[in-house]
Image (cartoon, helix red, strand yellow):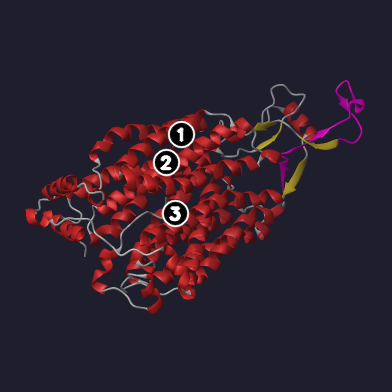
């Protein structure tokens, strides 16, 4: 156990001081959950059809019998499982010589249209309806989602460096302020390129806030309480996701919804004075007096007494350093890391793919988003229980395969379910999200215990990079359904998510079990099978970032 962990154990591992701090951190985590899925509200796609060129006040909703007659004459229809559906991208046109005094004759041409009307049942307006990101322009939706995920990927790297240089608290202030500015821009801008830049900055701020509050929370929490303290934040993250569905349902307008959701970020800025700088970071940067003051206050609030000579022993904990390139000196270790990276890519792809797809699923989009977010709560509870009694490798394999099979199984109700397919498809996708959420939180623990102490932070950082790549790719996988008609097209993204998830899950069979075993200290330990002292296991895990960033 390191010197600082020894002091924390004496001063109180999770006393009143940490609980007060966690109250603020959990509120901040709600805002992170909000901004993590707000992009879904921005690019939600309402039902639509081509606008009638000869009808001045055309609306998606049928106005009267005459309006219905013109729509039926002008808009092509097709039967989908026995239900007549208007084509969203095509319109009938007649040559001018075939139109006389409003009467049309001859065979019409089927052409792509240039303007649309949108169903306002669920959405008064979204960026899709404002910027016509449909039909031939539908790929813009994927680009906009990708911009958000790319911002998260860049933010994890760049802002983590900022955090190490200037402190955790400063990064929270910077990232939260950035989320307010970029969030308001996302709410009101109606140009594609500015919207992409705003979402990229919102994604970066999302990663920055979560990374900082997670690290601060872990660094002031005693070693035996860290896992549970970290998991608590995941619950509030899911609560933030659920709130987006509730506010969106009440307001139905992209501009107002995002504005209301971003306001709490601004209101929390003054509360950041309650958040101390991480004493570990202060020690690592030679600011021992400030670290000493923070630790003494922590002990005082927790009702503990620290001897001055004990506190004076606080100093930067030094660990042996190795290059992460050392893992490539052994094929056995290289393959182990390759399997870890594939799992991070696959679980992130499925988690964010299902989240981004939630409002495109059949049924009420707000209820769908709420249910997809709600599934994370039981996933985290079950994960906490299973990780305590069952091996990491088994839980990881089962969660990935369970979620993957559920995603692939959506093809069956789509092919054979007749007209009523919405409920079984939604149920299977929710099971997929359950598996993805459970696998995500398991994977972080598993990776922390597989990677040697000397390269743990860099190893987890590299893993998070592969996770972010999966998040960037996810919007384009979801867009695959636009390239194939029929049930196969609808199920294609789910088949891709599920197939890759099962493949990655089965790779865990070839990884060693870590439950109840000491953690490797060096890369050489991975080669020889030597491990650190089992008694040090609980205190060796230094949390660097959360899987949900």
Secondary element type, mark 3: loop
Residue 56's place in the image compared with 458, above or below, is above
Label whose residue precedes the other's in the sequence (3 or 1): 1
Confirm or deny contact between disc 2 and disc 1 (CB under 8 A): yes
Q: Is residue 104 magenta?
A: yes
To which quarter of the image does residue 166 belong?
top left
Q: Nearer the viewer, residue 236 or 300?
A: 300
Which region shows up in magenta?
A: 83-108
Residue 135's place in the image compared with 304, above or below, is above
Left or right? Give the position of 67 relative to 110.
left
To which quarter of the image does residue 36 belong?
top left
Q: Would you name the residue on which mark 2 appears? A: 205
Q: Would you name the residue on which mark 1 appears? A: 182
The tag on residue 59 is: none
Confirm or deny contact between disc 3 and disc 2 (CB under 8 A): no
Give the residue drawn at x 57%, y 63%: 500
Residue 175's place in the image compared with 452, above or below, is above
Secondary element type, mark 1: helix
Label whose residue precedes the other's in the sequence (3 or 2): 2
Secondary element type, mark 2: helix
**In this rendering, the label closer to the viewer, 3 or 1:** 1
Coordinates of residue 182 in the picture (x, y in percent): 46, 34
Q: Nearer the viewer, residue 154 or 413?
A: 154
Coordinates of residue 61 in the picture (x, y in percent): 65, 31
Q: Is residue 131 visible?
A: yes
Q: Would you name the residue on which mark 3 appears? A: 375
Left or right? Give the position of 279 relative to 338.
left
Q: Is residue 461 magenta?
A: no
Q: Nearer the viewer, residue 306 or 228?
A: 306
To which quarter of the image does residue 263 belong?
top left
């Amino acid at each position: 156990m390191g010197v600082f962990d020894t002091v924390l154990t004496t001063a109180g591992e999770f006393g009143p001081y940490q609980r007060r701090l966690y109250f603020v951190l959990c509120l901040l985590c709600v805002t992170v959950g909000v901004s993590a899925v707000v992009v879904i509200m921005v690019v939600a796609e309402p039902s639509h059809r081509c606008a009638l060129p000869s009808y001045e006040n055309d609306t998606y909703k049928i106005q009267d019998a005459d309006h219905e007659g013109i729509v039926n004459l002008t808009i092509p229809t097709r039967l989908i499982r026995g239900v007549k559906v208007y084509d969203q991208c095509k319109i009938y046109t007649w040559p001018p010589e075939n139109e006389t005094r409003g009467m049309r004759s001859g065979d019409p041409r089927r052409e792509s249209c240039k303007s649309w009307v949108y169903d306002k049942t669920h959405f008064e307006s979204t960026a899709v309806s404002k910027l016509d990101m449909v039909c031939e322009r539908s790929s813009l939706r994927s680009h906009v989602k990708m911009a958000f995920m790319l911002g998260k990927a860049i933010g994890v790297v760049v802002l983590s460096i900022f955090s190490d240089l200037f402190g955790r608290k400063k990064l929270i202030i910077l990232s939260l302020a950035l989320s307010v500015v970029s969030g308001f821009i996302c709410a009101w801008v109606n140009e594609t390129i500015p919207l992409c830049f705003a979402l990229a900055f919102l994604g970066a701020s999302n990663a920055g806030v979560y990374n900082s509050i997670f690290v601060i929370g872990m660094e002031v929490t005693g070693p035996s309480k860290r896992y549970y303290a970290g998991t608590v934040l995941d619950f509030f993250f899911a609560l933030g996701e659920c709130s987006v569905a509730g506010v969106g349902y009440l307001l139905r307008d992209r501009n107002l919804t995002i504005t209301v959701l971003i306001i709490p970020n601004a209101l929390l800025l003054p509360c950041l004075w309650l958040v101390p700088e991480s004493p570990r970071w202060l020690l690592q940067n030679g600011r021992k007096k400030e670290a000493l003051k923070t630790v003494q206050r922590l002990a005082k609030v927790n009702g503990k007494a620290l001897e001055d000579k004990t506190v004076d022993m606080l100093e930067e904990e030094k660990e042996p350093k190795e290059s992460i390139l050392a893992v490539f000196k052994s094929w056995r270790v290289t393959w182990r890391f390759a399997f870890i990276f594939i799992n991070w890519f696959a679980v992130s792809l499925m988690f964010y793919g299902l989240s981004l797809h939630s409002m495109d699923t059949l049924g009420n989009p707000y209820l769908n988003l709420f249910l997809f977010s709600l599934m994370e709560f039981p996933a985290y509870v079950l994960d906490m229980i299973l990780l305590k009694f069952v091996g990491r490798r088994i839980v990881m394999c089962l969660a990935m395969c369970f979620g993957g099979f559920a995603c692939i199984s959506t093809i069956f109700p789509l092919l054979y379910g007749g007209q009523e397919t919405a409920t079984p498809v939604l149920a299977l996708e929710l099971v997929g999200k359950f598996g993805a959420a459970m696998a995500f939180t398991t994977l972080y623990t598993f990776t922390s215990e597989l990677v040697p102490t000397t390269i743990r932070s860099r190893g987890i950082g590299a893993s998070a990079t592969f996770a972010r790549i999966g998040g960037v790719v996810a919007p384009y996988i979801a867009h695959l359904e636009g390239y194939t008609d029929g049930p196969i097209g609808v199920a294609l993204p789910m088949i891709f998510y599920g197939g890759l998830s099962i493949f990655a899950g089965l790779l865990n069979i070839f990884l060693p079990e870590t439950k109840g075993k000491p953690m490797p200290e060096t890369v050489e330990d991975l080669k020889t099978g030597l491990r650190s002292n089992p008694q040090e296991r609980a205190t060796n895990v230094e949390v660097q970032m959360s899987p949900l960033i």
